Amino acid sequence: MKTRFHKPIFLFKLLGICLVFLCIHRILFLCMFYNQFNDVALIEFIKAFLIGTLTDAISSIYFLLPMWLVLLFFNIEHKLTRQIALTWFVIGFSIACILNMADLGYYPVTKKRMGAELLDILPEVPALMGAYLKDYWYLLILLIAFFATAFLIFKKQFDNYRNVRQDFKPKFINTILVLALFFSIMRGGYGTRPFMPFDIPSMVDPKLQWLASNTPFQFIHTLENKNIKTETYFEESEAEKIIGFKKQFVSKEFKKKNILFIILESFYTERIGFLTPASKPYTPFLDSLLATSRTYKYGMANGRMTIDALPSVLSGIPSFMEKNYCYSNYNNNNVHAISSLLETEGYHTAFFYGGLKTTFGFENFMNINFTKNYFDQEDYDSKYENTGWGVDDHLFLPYIADKLKELPQPFCASFLTLSLHHPFPIPEPYKTLLDTIKNPIKKSMKYTDLSLQLFFNKIKNEDWFKNSIIAICADHTSEGLGFIENNPVNEFSIPISFLAPGDTAFNKVQNYSISQIDMYPTVLDYLGYSKPFISLGNSALNKNQATIQYSGNGVYRIFEYPYQLEFDNSSQKVSNFIQFNENRTMTQLKIDDSNKQKVEELTRIVKAYIQVFSYRINKNQF
């Protein structure tokens, strides 16, 4: 048998070696992020590793396909064949390892495996490579160790291979056998369609879907940038009615106050002392601001990355796709959101960001959907030391204050901060001033807090400030500090607050749920905007709003305090139902008759959101 199937055995031996290395990657992933999975049953981990073996095998064949073909069809004893095969191994295996290793550093931010969107952010990599390697040097060492060990093993296997003389018929059978088995693995079986990332949540505990997957597998299946499928759960008019898509607020007067959106980089709930007491030493100014604002205890992001936040906050476009909106086929769509509504009312617009305009395609998005008045680090006219993404916040935020003073009123402006993002650079004199804080994240929290204080100190006596509403939120969540429980709600939990100077009736803490896409409808409702408009978001002035998050692979989560439901759009089934408690812990609820009414209500709402989003974005009708 060994002689008859000599080459197939050899090839599958090589495949097995690849699986061992990728399994080690998975074990490393588990060890680094075990605290996020520690409440899952052992049997689910076993299932995750079994499914993971399949995703590893698929990735190994795809990424090393030229090598497999060369080894299958040519004489392995020939030196040229071995050299070509080894060259393709070096290329394919190194890329796969780099993808897996890089994601170990980025997973705490995105809480998912990165796909082909990695290609979109490649231009941002060189500027920050040094800082990332400084913090994640051990991943570079592991990468080199993995690659060197695998290279030596494969080279030895090639050098030791000896042909077995066979007639044409057994050679032909062996070739067909290998092709059939490899093709079967590449498809993930012989089902009606190939095995895809969104199949994983239905086969393992959804919490373990990213453990069962791997970054090369996610990358392969997100390369094609196709339009999303238009769902048809209801008649379109019924779906729009369910979510209140068409809006018109009742008002006697439109108060044309100035509007400012402040989007804080990575400043999620756990990093706000007002919402998480353990963080109070690091955010005293921000806490005082939120305490005198209309602050929502249960704010939620609609995406995982900064590039998702701007469409959500400023245009009401949530991140409901595998591809980021700014990099999708739809990024040239015209969205009739807050700026287009207010420009007809005489408002002027502006956006400020201390980094480059080209970062994540921000400028292109702003030009189409918010404003052409974009101020970035190139507009900042003073010298500064660039130690991170751009002009440090303690310099750029006062610059924004000066520019806002020059804007014609009324205006609708927005800015995005830089700090609290890796590599957490703290410039002097703050680096020395905050030297007693050793944790770089906590130090960056304090630095951002001080920078915000500088900004508000400059604007608090301005006339425009007294006649304004300021909406504050974080762009997304990030790496945890251990202050709150890791659960599906906290995974997207961010501060959302509205400050209306002088309006004492508008400074009460709200025990409601709200998301980023609800922010500008809430602002318009407060100001008394009475013209009809469309938006996926809703005003949260007087009640809870159902918030929708896409967690990847076809799974959506709907949160309406205190309940969260998880809906798998691929299988069209509810996969999880929980109650979120005041202390930010969760209680698992059964999906049975006792909860049937609420489950059906939330399922109906999330289906309507999915349908309206898919229909409208494909028709360019937002």
Image (cartoon, rainbow, N blue to C red):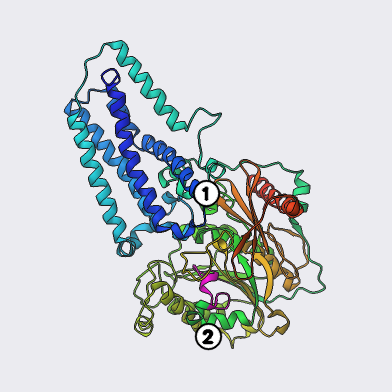
Tell me residue 590's x, y (percent).
Answer: 67, 53
Question: Mark 1 sits on what residue?
Answer: 323
Q: Nearer the viewer, residue 484 or 147?
A: 484
Tell me residue 608's x, y (percent).
Answer: 71, 49
Tell me residue 604's x, y (percent).
Answer: 73, 50
Q: What segment carries the magenta color?
A: 262-277
Q: Does residue 469 lie above or below 220 as drawn?
A: below
Mark nearest the camera among 1 and 2 is 1
Q: Nearer the viewer, residue 500 or 144?
A: 144
Residue 350 at least partly seen: yes
Residue 601 at least partly seen: no
Give yes or no for residue 154 being in the magenta stretch. Answer: no
Q: Say which label, 1 or 2, has the lower sequence index.
A: 1
Tell me residue 216's x, y (percent).
Answer: 40, 44
Q: Does residue 144 lie above or below 233 as drawn?
A: below
Question: Mark 2 sits on what residue?
Answer: 458
Mark 2 lies on a secondary structure that is helix
Q: Amino acid at mark 1?
A: Lys
Q: Amino acid at mark 2?
A: Lys
Give yes or no for residue 273 being in the magenta stretch. Answer: yes
Q: Residues within 10 Å of mark 2 (few under 14, many from 20)?
A: some
Q: Is residue 26 left or right of residue 576?
A: left
Residue at the spot x=30%, y=19% of the render? 1
Question: Would you identify the image quadrant in which residue 7 lies?
Answer: top left
